[in-house]
């Protein structure tokens, strides 16, 4: 029997605190047998407490994930790098030629809730983005372009 090779995906965001962390959590939870998921940021701002909370509500624990700068990754070799915010796409570091770069932008919950009137209103924004990321991850890896050589 041939060994199963999982698709290596890096979810990249500016601060690796929210969107990329949620994407990594969903990929591990929903597609762990098919995808080897990691996340990183251009910077490392720590895990967003609301992201941890809304993912926990959905049955996914990301509390042990670590906010990491892309330069700190132990193995920078990926099949795909998926940027989940515009800033990360614009400042994405160079990866080996075989790595496919894909951009799928999601709203930035911390920015959207900076002027929220209540915690309930803020969490509603996080939940909406969490659910959008889940729908995207559910289509992986099948929705990705074919392998690169």
Image (tube, grey):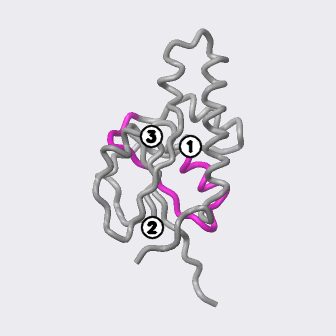
Q: Is residue 123 left or right of residue 112?
A: right
Few, some or many C-alpha atoms within 10 Å of disc 3 (few <14, some 14-19, many ≥20)? many
Tag 2 or tag 3, which sits nearer the N-term?
2
Say which label, 1 or 2, has the lower sequence index.
1
Asked if the stretch drawn in magenta spans residue 39, the answer is yes
Mark in front: 1 vs 3: 3
Residue 99 against residue 131 in the figure, above or below: below
Residue 8 position in % (x across, y down): 48, 65
* Badge 1 density bin: few <14, some 14–19, many ≥20, Cα 10 Å: many
What residue appears at the point 39 percent right and 66 percent down from the top-left corner?
99
The x, y position of residue 87, in whole percent, is 37, 38
Residue that badge 1 annotates: 22
Residue beneath label 2, please? 79
SS state under label 3: loop
The Cα–Cα distance between marks 3 and 2, rounded to whole angstroms, is 19 Å
Q: Is residue 4 above or below residue 19?
A: below
Q: Which residues are magenta?
A: 22-45
Q: Residue at x 65, y 32 (%)?
A: 128
- What quarter of the picture does the C terminus occupy? bottom left
Q: Earlier in the sequence, mark 1 or mark 3?
A: 1
Residue 91: x %, y % from top left: 30, 44
Point out which mark residue 85 bears: 3
Q: Residue at x 33, y 39 (%)?
A: 43
- In three-dimensional space, the C-alpha distance between marks 1 and 2, rounded to whole angstroms, equals 19 Å
| Residue at (51% x, 43% y) in the render | 21
Q: Are marks 3 and 2 in contact (CB under 8 Å)?
A: no
Left or right of 7: which side holds 61?
Answer: right
Q: Closest to the observer: 47 or 10? A: 10
Q: Is residue 41 magenta?
A: yes
- Secondary structure type for disc 2: loop
């Amino acid at each position: 029997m041939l060994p199963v090779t999982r698709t290596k995906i890096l979810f990249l965001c500016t601060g690796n605190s929210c969107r990329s962390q949620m994407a990594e959590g969903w990929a591990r939870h929903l597609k762990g047998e098919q995808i080897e998921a990691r996340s990183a940021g251009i910077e490392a701002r720590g895990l967003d407490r609301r992201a941890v909370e809304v993912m926990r509500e959905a049955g996914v624990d990301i509390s042990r994930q670590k906010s990491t700068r892309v330069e700190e990754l132990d193995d920078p070799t990926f099949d795909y790098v998926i940027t989940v915010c515009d800033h990360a796409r614009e400042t994405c570091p160079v990866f080996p030629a075989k790595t496919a770069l894909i951009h799928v932008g999601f709203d930035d919950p911390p920015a959207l809730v900076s002027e929220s009137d209540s915690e309930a209103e803020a969490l509603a924004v996080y939940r909406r983005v969490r659910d959008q990321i889940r729908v995207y991850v559910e289509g992986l890896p099948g929705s990705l372009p074919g392998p690169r050589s």
